[in-house]
Every structure is written in structure tokens, then in C-alpha cells.
Image (cartoon, grey):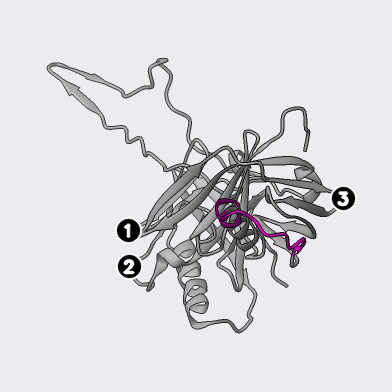
Amino acid sequence: MTKTIRRSLGVLAVTAVLLPLAACGSEQSAQDPSGSAPTDLELSDLDGRTFAAGRDGAGGSIRSTTLDDAGDLAVQVTFDGDRIAVAGGCNGVGGIAAIADGTLTVEDQASTDMGCAQELMDLDAWLGEFLSSEPSIELDQDVLVLTSGQDRLELPEAQADVSADDLNGTWELEALTRAQDDTASAAAGDYDATLTVADGEVGVDTGCNTGRAVVAVAGQSWETESVAITKKGCPPAKAKVERQILEVLESSPTFEVADGTLTLTTPDGSQGLQLRLRAGATP
């Protein structure tokens, strides 16, 4: 049985490389500004943490010299004590991990053996070979970087799982987002639309019509059944807002919550909603 590993967003990694410095008649050792030598990454630093990259808003990057369309794939890596588990959307591979001198080794590798789409089977094979190659491993802030030759994974740390109850409250629409020609734009406005989450349901007020639907979340996915909504005629501007709200909600969007802002985005990234938690409301 495979284990589902949650995904989430992050930042790009920066690698610090220390080189011996030579001066006339003397040598200096590279140190950080505090004067103490930098600390090597240890396996205990990663215990209980999950890192992810790829599609569905996870961020990060997957660079492979052999995989086709690696940027359209997804990889998740989880550490639990001395064990590492790696998943690519089909089978999982895991083993006993160790880190020494900036190198990751994985012994006693084992994997599940399900039939999958060819691109996922190729990814599974590549991940096994990548782990066996003893890649270098670095952690910069919340981004895990694994490198083997020209192959490289940059994996932001995944956010903790969120339940529908964690989203309870009234969220006020702040902006509609659209992506055209790979360029994202946000149309901020004085909207009077809201989403109110409570008891596993979402109340929808588009600023014209109102409705309700069952809502569930899993990982970064927001699942809403078809919204039962009133059918009052709306002015063109409000009708446009209503249309985008319903299209996003019924698309099984991905979501992100940060600093009191809820962002919902269609799976293809073409449009979304940005909402702010109403003052005084607590999810």
C-alpha cells in the first residue's frame, strides 16, 4: 500500500560553498560572520518533515537529464527517524537514510509495484536510481536540495495538513485572479462576495445570489459538490464575479492559507480567488 504524502509551497534554495582562502604567507579558514564553523546537515534536522515539488502549486523544481517533461511531474520526500519515503504519484520508494559529509545514502531500498501511466513508471525508476547515486543534500531555510550530476531536486517544505474545520469563518473576496499567456493578474475590487465555512459546508454569497455546498479538503485540494444557488438575475459586473466564483469552487481547486488570506486556484492555474478572513473571525 502506498502512503500519501502531502504537498505544499516554498522558496528557492541558495547553496553556500566554502573555499579555502590563501593569503601571502598565511591561510584563513572560511567561517560564518559569527566566527564559528557552519554546522553540517544531520538526519535529525529532517525528522518528521515533508518536502515536495512539482505540479498542483507545490513549487520547487525537478531537473532531470533523462525524464521527458519533468516539470509536469511531482515528487514528495518524507523523513521519519532514520527512514526516508519518496513518492512520485504512483509507487513509493523508501529505505534507511544516512547523511555524512553532505551526502545522502539510502540502504535497504524497497518500493511498491503497482501498474501506472508510463510517465509515472519512468519517474519511479528515475527516483530509485537518483537515490542510489548518493546525491548531495543541503537544506537552506525550508528548501531541501538534492543533486546528482546534472539531476537536481529543489523541494520546499510542505505545509501542515489543513481540515475543513481549520477554515471555519467568513472569507471576504479581495481579488479575482486570471492567468493569460503565462502571466498572472489579480483584479482587486470592492467586492461584497463572501464564502462562509462551517460544519463541513460552505455558504456562498456572490454579491448577487446565495447558495450552499458540502466542502472537504485533502492536502492542498478543496472539494466542493455542485453549489445549490439562487437564480436571481444579476448586473453584468456582478454576474461576471459570480461566474468566476462558481467556476473556481466547482473545479476542485487547490488552496493555500497564509497570514489570514485564503487563495483558491483552478487545477490548470487559469483563474482563482483571493479572500481575506473577516476581522474578528477565527478559523
- Residue 239 percent across, percent down from the top left: 60, 57
On the image, the x and y values in percent for residue 277 come to 69, 36
Q: Which residue is rendered at x = 25% and y = 29% of the image?
A: 20
Q: How crowded is mark 3: few (under 14 residues within 10 Å), some or many (20 or more)?
A: few
Mark closest to the chain's N terminus, 1 or 2 = 2
Task: Indicate yes or no whether the magenta region holds residue 229.
Answer: yes
Q: Name the residue under label 2.
A: 65
Q: Do the residues labelled 1 and 2 touch (CB within 8 Å)?
A: yes
Give, as a single range, the part of the protein colored magenta.
227-240
Label 2: how many residues lie within 10 Å, few (<14), some (14-19) or many (20+)? few
Quarter of the picture containing the C terminus is: top right
Against 230, is 140 above or below?
Answer: above
Residue 57 sits above or below residue 26 on the image: below
Check disc 1 and report the residue beneath it: 149
Instruction: Describe the element under mark 1 as helix, strand or loop.
Output: loop
Is residue 69 depicted above or below 265 in this figure?
A: below
Distance CA(mark 1)–CA(mark 3): 50 Å
Please say whether residue 55 is one of the residues in the magenta stretch: no
The image quarter containing residue 38 is top left
Nearer the camera: disc 3 or disc 2 = 3
Left or right of 175: which side holds 282? right
Residue 277 seen by the camera:
yes
Q: In this view, does 30 lie above or below 191?
A: above
Of labels 1 and 2, the one closer to you: 2
Amino acid type at image mark 3: Asp
Say what amino acid the circle numbered 1 marks: Gly
- SS at circle 2: loop
The Cα atoms of the two marked residues, 3 and 2, are separated by: 48 Å
Residue bearing mark 3: 199
Of the two numbered discs 1 and 3 in the rendering, the one whose residue sits closer to the viewer = 3
